[in-house]
Amino acid sequence: MEMARAHVFIRGKVQGVFFRQSMKEVAMRNGVKGWVRNRSDGKTVEAVLEGPRDAVMKVLEWARIGPPGARVEDIEVQWEEYKGEFKDFKILPTV
């Protein structure tokens, strides 16, 4: 099983629509670990996803649409070397 790590920036109407909590639920359901947080610009959510490549891809597919009320305008994915550093999926404070 190929493991993957994606550093993701999702832009649009993605704050105030339960994006982070919804992403956490989708990630956990798919066995993906990492974190998600809002950025202080008010229109970006940032996340790091680690897990089996297929599972990470499922979370990324979901992130292109997001939860009801979200309007994703752009998603930037930076593939990084898998580190296996996470035990679970967390919502981090805004930066």
Image (cartoon, rainbow, N blue to C red):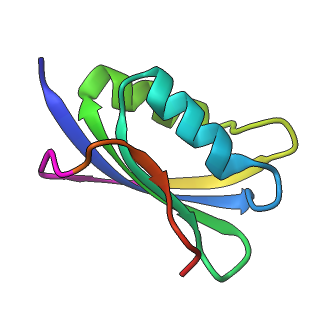
Residue lying furthest front in this view? 87
Quadrant of residue 48 in the image? bottom left
* Quadrant holding the C terminus: bottom right
The residue that appears at 47% across and 33% down in the rendered structure is 27
- Taking the image as drawn, is residue 64 in sight? no
The image shows residue 8, relative to residue 58, as above or below, that is: below
Quadrant of residue 80 in the image? bottom left
Quadrant of residue 54 in the image? top left
65 falls in the magenta region: no
The residue that appears at 73% across and 60% down in the rendered structure is 12
Q: Is residue 31 left or right of residue 87?
A: right
Residue 70 or residue 93, whichever sits in front: 93
Q: Where is residue 24 in the image (x, y as percent from the top left)?
A: 54, 40
Q: How many marks can you see? A: 0
Tell me the magenta residue range.
77-85
Residue 46 or residue 20, whichever sits in front: 20
Residue lying furthest top in this view? 1
Q: Where is residue 42 in the image (x, y as percent from the top left)?
A: 73, 76
The residue that appears at 59% across and 76% down in the rendered structure is 94
80 falls in the magenta region: yes
Q: Position of residue 51 (x, y in %)?
A: 26, 33
- Taking the image as drawn, is residue 26 in sight? yes
Q: In this view, does 47 lie to the left or right of 63?
A: left
Q: In this view, does 51 lie to the left or right of 30?
A: left
* Quadrant holding the N terminus: top left
Q: Is residue 15 left or right of residue 37?
A: right
